[in-house]
Image (spheres, rainbow, N blue to C red):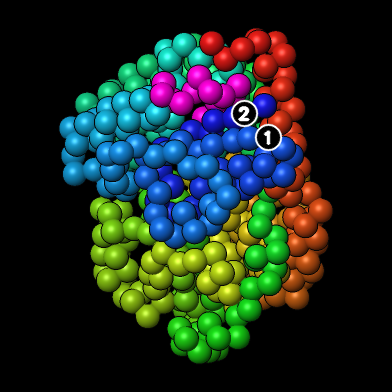
């Protein structure tokens, strides 16, 4: 069997890129030939893809985290769809299955004539990720959702999600059945984190440390983490929040303005993009890992944090919440300040929960299991639909 994995960008080693790389590596161990088609790849990510076949276009497509305007966003979307579609058309005929990942890979695979298309829906697609959109933009977004539904229903043969919550969302949005395949976690990397040098490097002595990892976006909802710190700064005088992840967008500017207006400069710090090893080290010295994510992305992060024995607090709306709540692995709530204060005052109790969570992740969330379940779906699609044309 040959599998073509399609993902828009591999420009930094985020959650979706972690999924793509580990899936390709595990398929290789299972004697399944696979390639990754993407519009861009950074040197950092390329260094992690040794032994993998990466297909990129001759023309460079840089990753854009912030669109200057709605028109610029539409232009970028069209360019990315066309760029990915050219890759799928050029190389897809050599593969038995096309495994698409993040939007707009779904649109790029549409109407190409390929039959065996499996979508790993890592996050719900959002047509316009911006706070305070005008009525016109909201109307356009709604139209975009209907176009997206039309395209996906005529393109995708199997829809895969990581948890029941996202399954219900995506199944409802597209009117499709779904397969739940929980991701693996890089347990060895995170469980071997060592925070001894981090405290001195960043001056974290005698601090109660809250860490949130993820791209600075409205969906990751870092503003709620900052508001929780504001609410607690008098009750927990040594509290600090570390925001780890790339940003430099309007949303980050709004957060920085809020921090300045509320005199939180000594309590909130932007760490920028860090390597996975550095993140593991920071988790090791953190008292709480906080994820007030709305509905999009961030699935891996709380489980990665669990590998370092840090208590985890997640929103009720993020995809990982259903598993965390079911298995009793952390605090699922939208009262972030209250949850943090409980951990501050009952640290030993939450450390016991963290120990249970670490063992659960080690036993249940492996990339080998993830790849084997994906392979069974690929085989089922081929059996039921035959060749890819």
**Could you say which is closer to the camera, residue 379 or residue 246?**
379
To which quarter of the image does residue 88 belong?
top left
Left or right of 294, for residue 312: right
Q: Earlier in the sequence, mark 2 or mark 1?
A: 2
Residue 107 in percent (x, y) is at 40, 23
Q: Residue at x 25, y 53 (%)?
A: 250
Left or right of 41, for residue 310: right
- Does 94 lie within the magenta span? yes
Q: Residue at x 52, y 42 (%)?
A: 53
Left or right of 121, for residue 252: left
Left or right of 173, for residue 329: right
Q: Which residue is mark 1?
A: 32
- Does 159 lie within the magenta span? no
Q: Residue at x 51, y 47 (%)?
A: 17
Q: Which residues are magenta?
A: 88-100
Please tell me the numbered disc located at residue 247: none
When the figure is inspected, residue 329 is found, relative to residue 97, above or below; the finding is below
Residue 326 in percent (x, y) is at 76, 45
Please tell me the numbered disc located at residue 2: 2
Q: CA distance from mark 2 to mark 1?
A: 6 Å
Tag 2 and tag 1, C-beta contact below 8 Å: yes
């Amino acid at each position: 069997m040959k599998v073509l994995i399609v993902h828009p960008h591999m420009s930094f080693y985020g959650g979706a890129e972690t999924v793509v790389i580990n899936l390709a590596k595990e398929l290789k161990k299972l004697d399944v030939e696979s390639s990754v088609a993407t519009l861009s790849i950074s040197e950092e990510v390329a260094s992690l893809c040794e032994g993998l076949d990466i297909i990129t276009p001759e023309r460079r497509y840089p990753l854009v985290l912030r669109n200057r305007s709605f028109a610029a966003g539409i232009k970028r979307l069209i360019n990315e769809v066309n760029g990915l579609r050219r890759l799928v058309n050029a190389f897809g005929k050599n593969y038995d299955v096309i495994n698409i990942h993040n939007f707009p890979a779904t649109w790029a695979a549409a109407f190409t004539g390929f039959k065996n298309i499996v979508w790993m829906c890592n996050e719900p697609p959002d047509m316009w990720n911006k706070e305070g959109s005008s009525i016109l933009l909201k109307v356009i977004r709604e139209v975009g959702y209907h176009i997206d539904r039309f395209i996906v229903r005529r393109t995708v043969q199997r829809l895969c999600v990581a948890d029941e919550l996202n399954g219900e969302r995506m199944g409802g949005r597209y009117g499709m059945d779904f397969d739940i395949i929980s991701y693996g976690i890089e347990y060895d990397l995170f469980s071997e984190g060592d925070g001894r040098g981090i405290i001195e490097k960043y001056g974290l002595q005698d601090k109660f440390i809250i860490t949130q990892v993820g791209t600075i976006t409205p969906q990751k909802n870092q503003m709620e983490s900052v508001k929780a710190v504001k609410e607690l700064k008098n009750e927990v005088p040594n509290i600090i929040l570390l925001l780890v992840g790339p940003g430099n967008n309007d949303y980050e500017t709004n957060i920085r303005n809020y921090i300045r207006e509320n005199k939180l400069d000594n309590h909130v710090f932007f760490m920028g993009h860090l390597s996975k090893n550095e993140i593991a080290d920071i988790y090791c010295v953190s008292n709480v890992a906080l994820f007030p994510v709305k509905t999009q992305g961030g699935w891996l992060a709380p489980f990665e944090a669990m590998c370092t024995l840090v208590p985890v607090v997640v929103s009720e709306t993020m995809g990982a919440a259903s598993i965390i709540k079911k298995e009793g692995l952390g605090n699922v709530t939208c009262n972030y300040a209250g949850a943090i204060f409980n951990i501050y005052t009952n640290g030993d109790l939450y450390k016991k929960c963290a120990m249970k969570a670490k063992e659960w992740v080690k036993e249940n969330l492996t990339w080998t299991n993830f790849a084997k379940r994906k392979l069974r779906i690929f085989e089922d699609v081929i059996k039921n639909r035959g060749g890819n044309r």
